[in-house]
Image (cartoon, rainbow, N blue to C red):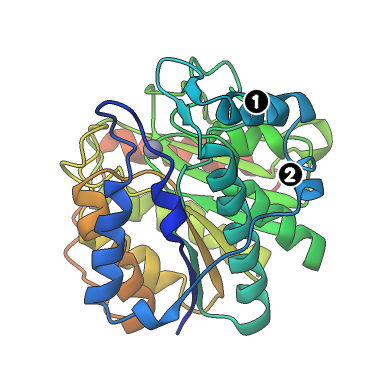
């Protein structure tokens, strides 16, 4: 079942002056997919977040900086990340959409979505997180807002981040919080540089952060192996009321920013295997083929329960990293 889809035309107003991969055209691709799936009647206009909520995930100084830069006309925060005059308003609306999609998932179940820009998973409490060189196109952390909402309502949260890049901002925000389990699959040794297997959470939260740094050029066979061996057993063990999917589609073959070679097979498999849980999909990255083909494949997987089984075998490198993650996590998770 598809629940509520939070989207607003205002998400198009955060836009760059010159060419940038993170631009409003991304949401046109997403919207075309929603129409082709016949889901446009489920679109709901979100409301902005209450400002008090934002300080639970971001430092007031950082929030003030974004607001000031935006209301003064905008500019580049760093080499990758722009702010324009509407960014403040749009980013607050994206947080609101993420919160509302989570509440909807908790109340009604099904696959609920926050189809938002700017993306969020690289934004830490004070901006750049864990030594990252830039904010990686992100302003406020939408997935963290979803996790916070889930935690406030149920006492815990489970985030699965399959964006091709490590969700360093999300990890930093909940580093010391044992009630927020964050599983992150990403391409190793690319931006933002974090997400090593040994990053497992702060002293009282050890084992609650699970990183699976996938080899360059990983394909469906590699990702499905890691998904089956680590992600699904953790989901089964947590038995979450809702799963927050920090959903980036930039691992799709040819999407442009990474070497990963995923196809519809992985994304639909991910959807199929999560279909017994209520989901909140928070849009992160994905710039071309991933949005066009990976995004609808995930939705159709969740809806239709058709597993395509020609995924192929994992590489030796993938077998090694999966073994390493299982070994490191063995005191907390019987994988
Ligand atoms: Zn990404």
Q: Is residue 131 left or right of residue 208?
A: left
The crowd level at tag 2 (other Cα within 10 Å; few <14, some 14-19, many 20+) is: many
Mark identifier at residue 68: 1
Dot 2 lies on which element?
A: helix
* Spot occupied by residue 186 in the image (x, y as percentages of width and height): 41, 38
Where is 261 relative to 133, above or below? below
Residue at mark 1 to residue at mark 2: CA–CA distance: 16 Å
Where is 284 relative to 137, above or below? below
Task: Determine if the C-beta at disc 1 is less than 8 A from ligand 1.
Answer: no
Figure quadrant of residue 264: bottom left
Where is 293 relative to 202, above or below? below
Q: Ligand 1 sits in which quadrant? A: top left
Disc 1 or disc 2, which is closer to the eye? Answer: 1
Mark identifier at residue 54: 2
The one of 322 and 195 positioned closer to us in this rendering: 195
* Spot occupied by residue 283 in the image (x, y as percentages of width and height): 44, 53
Q: Residue at x 38, y 37 (%)?
A: 15
Figure quadrant of residue 123: top right
């Amino acid at each position: 079942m598809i629940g509520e889809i939070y989207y607003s035309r205002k998400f198009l107003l955060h836009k760059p002056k010159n060419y940038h991969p993170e631009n409003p055209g991304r949401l046109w691709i997403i919207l075309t997919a929603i129409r082709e799936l016949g889901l446009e009647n489920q679109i709901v206009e979100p409301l902005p977040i209450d400002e008090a909520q934002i300080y639970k995930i971001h430092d007031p100084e950082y929030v003030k900086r974004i607001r000031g830069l935006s209301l003064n006309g905008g500019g580049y925060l760093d080499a990758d990340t722009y702010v324009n005059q509407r960014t403040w308003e749009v980013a607050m609306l994206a947080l609101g959409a993420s919160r509302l999609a989570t509440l909807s998932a908790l109340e009604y179940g099904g696959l609920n979505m926050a189809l938002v820009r700017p993306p969020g998973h690289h934004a830490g409490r004070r901006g750049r997180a864990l030594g990252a060189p830039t904010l990686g196109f992100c302003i406020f952390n939408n997935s963290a807002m979803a996790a916070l909402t889930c935690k406030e309502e149920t006492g815990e949260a489970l985030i699965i981040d399959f964006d091709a890049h490590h969700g360093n901002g999300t990890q930093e925000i909940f580093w010391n919080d044992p009630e927020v389990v964050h599983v992150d699959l990403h391409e190793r040794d690319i931006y933002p540089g974090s997400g090593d297997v040994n990053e497992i959470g702060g002293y009282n939260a050890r084992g609650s952060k699970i990183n699976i740094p996938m080899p360059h050029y990983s394909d469906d066979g590699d990702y499905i192996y890691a998904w089956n061996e680590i992600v699904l057993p953790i989901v089964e063990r947590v038995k979450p009321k809702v799963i927050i999917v920090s959903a980036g589609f930039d691992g799709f073959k040819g999407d442009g920013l990474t070497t990963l070679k995923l196809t519809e097979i992985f994304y639909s498999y991910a959807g199929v295997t999560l279909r017994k849980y209520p989901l909140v999909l928070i849009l992160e990255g994905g710039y071309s083929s991933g949005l066009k083909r990976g995004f609808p494949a995930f939705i159709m997987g969740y809806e239709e329960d058709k597993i395509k089984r020609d995924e192929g075998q994992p590489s030796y490198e993938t077998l090694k990293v999966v073994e390493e993650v299982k070994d490191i996590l063995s005191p907390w998770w019987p994988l």
